[in-house]
Image (cartoon, helix red, strand yellow):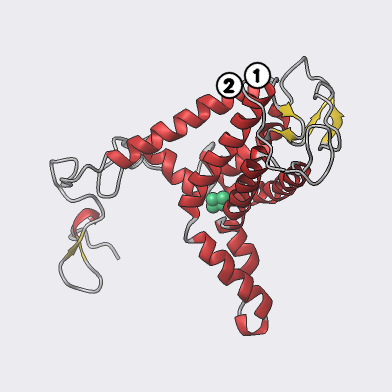
Amino acid sequence: MATGTEPPPAARPHPRGGGVHTTTRAAIAARHLRTDRWWLAPAATAAGLLAFVVYSTWRAFAGADYYAAPYVSPFYSPCLAENCVPMKGGPNWEIFGAWWGLSPAIIILIFPLGFRLTCYYYRKAYYRGFWASPPACAVAEPHRRYTGETRFPLILQNLHRYFFYAAVPVAGILTYDTVLAFRDEHYAWGHMGLGTLVFLVNIVLIWAYTLSCHSCRHIVGGKLKHFSRHPVRYRMWRLVGKLNARHMQLAWASLLSVGLADLYVYLVASGVFDDPRFF
Ligand code: FES
C-alpha cells in the first residue's frame, strides 16, 4: 500500500539489495564515454547498404539487359509478366500482365526485398546506420522516445517468418537458373562459362544466407521439449546453428554476390564483353 513516503521510481532501493536501482539513464552529461572510432561501423554499413539500394533500384526499374542466354539476372527471376523477354527453358511464366510497361523485376523483388528488410541482422544494420537508434553500443540515441517494434510500421517486422517461406522457393528457382547456366548460348548442355561460375557462387551464398536465418533455426529446432526424441531435427538444428553464427557475414556476402550476378548479366547482355567459355 502506498504510504506517500516511498522514494521516486527513478531511485528505488533494489529488491535484492545492494543499493539503488534506477529506471532511467545514469546522469552523465556526455553522450557517450567511448574513445574508439565507434562511428566507423555504422557509417560503413550505411554506405554499403546505400550503394546496393541505388544500384538495385536502377537495375530493377531498367527492365532491360537482364537476359543473356543462358543467364537470367537474379533480379528478374522468375519473370512473371507479359513483357518478359523469352527465355528458353527459363522460369518465365506470363501470370501477370504488362502492368503499364513496368519492369517485371518489381513483381518478384518484393519477396527477397521483404526478406532482407525484415531480417534480424539487417534491422540492426539499418537501425544503426540510418536511424542512429542506437548508433552503436553504449552510445545514446538522439531520439527522445523509444517504442521498439511494437507500433506501425515497425510491427510489420514480425512478418519475417512469412518472408522466409517466400524466400525458399525463390532460392529454389535461382538454383534452377544455375542449372540452366550449364548450357551455352545456343542452349546446348554440358558447357560452362565464367557466368556459370558467378551463378554457382551466388546460389551457394543465397542458400547459406537463407538457411542461416533465425526463423529457419526456430522452424527446424524450435518448440521441441526433447532433442533426444528428434535426432534428425537436432542434427539439422546444429547445422543451421553453425550457419546462423555467420549470419552477418552471409548477409553481406550474398548481397554482394547477387548484385555481381546481376551486373555480370547486364554487362554480357549489353554487349560490354562476351561470356568467356571454359568448355
Ligand atoms: S534473420 Fe536474417 S534472414 Fe532471417
Q: Is residue 192 left or right of residue 13?
A: right
Front residue of 35 and 69: 69
Q: Position of residue 204 (x, y in %)?
A: 62, 52
Q: In this view, does 214 lie to the left or right of 136?
A: right
Front residue of 35 and 243: 243
- Note whether 193 is above or below 84 in the view shown: below
Mark 2–mark 1 CB contact (< 8 Å): yes
SS label for mark 1: helix
Residue under the point 67% across and 49% down:
162
**Quarter containing the C terminus:** top right
Q: Position of residue 120 (x, y in %)?
A: 50, 50
For mark 1, does the 10 Å Cα neighbourhood hold few (<14), some (14 to 19), or many (20 or more) residues?
some
- Note whether 68 is above or below 215 in the view shown: above
- Which residue position holds label 2? 58
- Outermost residue on the bottom side: it is 228
Question: Mark 1 near ligand 1 (CB under 8 Å)?
Answer: no
For mark 2, does the 10 Å Cα neighbourhood hold few (<14), some (14 to 19), or many (20 or more) residues?
few
Q: Where is residue 193 in the image (x, y as percent from the top left)?
A: 68, 39
Q: In this view, does 40 lie to the left or right of 104?
A: left
Q: Position of residue 178 (x, y in %)?
A: 72, 45
- Looking at the rendered structure, the kind of residue marked 2 is Trp
Answer yes or no: is residue 184 visible.
yes
Specify the label residue 224 is tagged with. Answer: none
- Which residue position holds label 1? 62
SS label for mark 2: helix
Front residue of 143 and 248: 248
- Outermost residue on the top side: it is 100
Residue under the point 66% across and 27% down:
274
- Looking at the rendered structure, the kind of residue marked 1 is Ala
- Outermost residue on the left side: it is 29
- The count of marks equals 2
